[in-house]
Amino acid sequence: MEEKDEIWEKVKRDFTNDPALQEVHYARLKIHEQTKDMSDEEYIEFIKMKAKKLIGENITQTTSSH
């Protein structure tokens, strides 16, 4: 939780008047922190896992709304 607070504080300083850019920049920094020590292969698997999770969530949301 402390790490998130530090990242958010940096983002808020860098993009004081733009909440949309704050969100994008925070996501970019968070992904960097999660992947900075990964090999290329590990990074690719990380991205694939995130994509599968996102696709699955979108399919679930779409089907449950009908």
Image: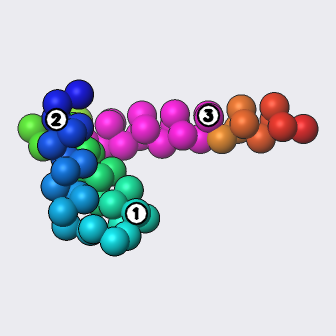
Label 3: state its secondary structure.
Answer: helix
Residue at 23% in and 37% down = 4
Residue at 71% in and 32% down = 60
Residues rendered magenta in the picture: 43-57
Q: Amino acid at mark 2?
A: Glu
Nearer to the camera, 5 or 40: 5
Label 2: state its secondary structure.
Answer: helix
Label 1 Cα neighbours within 10 Å, binned few <14 / some 14-19 / many ≥20: few
Q: Is residue 45 left or right of residue 10?
A: right
Task: Kindly indicate the quadrant of the structure image that contains residue 35.
Answer: top left
Q: Which residue is mark 2?
A: 3
The mark nearer the N terminus, 3 or 2, is 2
Q: Amino acid at mark 1?
A: Pro
Specify the quadrant that holds the N terminus. top left
> How far apart are labels 2 and 1 at the CA level?
19 Å
Chief secondary structure of the magenta span? helix
Number of marks present in the image shown? 3
Q: Position of residue 42 (x, y in %)?
A: 23, 36
Task: Kindly indicate the quadrant of the structure image that contains residue 20.
Answer: bottom left
Q: Which residue is mark 1?
A: 19
Q: Are marks 1 and 3 in contact (CB under 8 Å)?
A: no
- Which residue reaches farthest front? 17
The answer to whether residue 55 is magenta is yes
> How far apart are labels 3 and 2 at the CA level?
28 Å
- Which residue reaches farthest left? 37
Mark nearest the camera among 1 and 3 is: 1
The mark nearer the N terminus, 1 or 3, is 1
Q: Which residue is mark 3?
A: 56
